[in-house]
Image (spheres, rainbow, N blue to C red):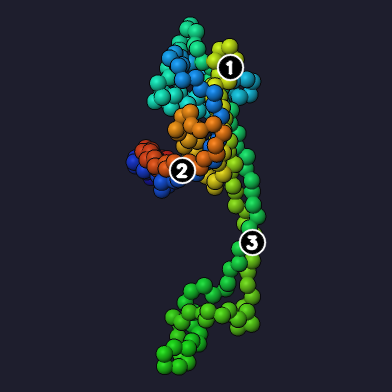
Amino acid sequence: MKYLATLATAAVLLLSGCATTISSNVTAFNDWPADLADKSYAFEAPQGADDTLEYRNYQVLVANELGKLGFHQVADNQSPKLLVGMKFFTIDHPVRVLQTEYPFMGPYWGPYYGRYGWGYSRWAYRPFFYDPFFYGPTRVEERVKHQYQRQLRVTINNTSGRKLYDVTVQNTSGVQATPHVMPALVQSAFTGFPGQNGVPRTIDITIEPKTETVQAAASAPKAN
């Protein structure tokens, strides 16, 4: 007997999670001239292994923030007045955590003490003071939690080499995906630009969750 192949197509909504607040430590140093009229710039070419698609994607984030401040990126055949550099890194710091679990965490069939004295019910909860001889031994489980340390540094110099702006953004969180965090780090780098010289600040940026629609198809093979 032959079975007709079936094809099912479903639209699946993938949510990246709830809104996340990214808290960063930001320190900027600047020697920004008050009479700088020409804000044309180009990015410094990334070196070697730094020249990745991820790196160039983050350059776009920096360009968007600079555009809000009146900067404009020149074409390849034009000469800029400023050069913008960018570096970033992510370090994973795994932390081993011991988690204690008790054998009875919910309802059980056993004795309890209520308003009218002692009784016996399957819906009684274990007493507040845990007795390992009565309820059994405690189970200890080792788990690994990850903390991701990230740093973003953006510099702006003029073409003669004079340093005008140097900002460092540092963040540590449990968010694994750097592309999810980087928009907040870049925005923090230019918040209050150029800012007070050498004064550390803590900047909180809230990232809203993204929704993506994926078409999933499944088919059953024909059988004879």
Residue at the spot of label 2: 204
Q: Is residue 75 visible in the rendered structure shown here?
A: yes
Residue at the spot of label 1: 162
Q: Secondary structure at mark 3?
A: strand
Q: Position of residue 65 (x, y in %)?
A: 43, 27
Viewport quadrant of the C terminus: top left
Alpha carbon distance from label 2 to label 3: 31 Å
Sequence-wise first label, 1 or 3: 3
Write the residue at 55% across / 18% down: 157
Q: Is residue 97 left or right of residue 191?
A: right
What amino acid type is highlighted by mark number 2?
Answer: Asp
Q: Is residue 177 visible in the rendered structure shown here?
A: no
Residue at the spot of label 3: 98
**Is residue 206 shown above or below 84?**
below
What amino acid type is highlighted by mark number 3?
Answer: Leu
> Dots 2 and 3: beta carbons under 8 Å?
no
Write the residue at 44% across / 41% down: 205
Q: Quadrant of residue 200?
A: top right
Q: Is residue 134 left or right of residue 217?
A: right
Q: Secondary structure at mark 1?
A: loop
Q: Position of residue 142 (x, y in %)?
A: 64, 59
Write the residue at 43% across / 19% down: 71
**Is residue 62 shown above or below 147?**
above
Query: Toward the viewer: 224 or 98?
Result: 98
Q: Position of residue 163 (x, y in %)?
A: 58, 20
Alpha carbon distance from label 1 to label 2: 31 Å
Front of the two marks 1 and 3: 1
**Is residue 79 shown above or below 137?**
above
Viewport quadrant of the N terminus: top left
- Disc 3 crowd rating (10 Å Cα; few below 14, some 14-19, many 20+) is few
Q: Quadrant of residue 28?
A: top right
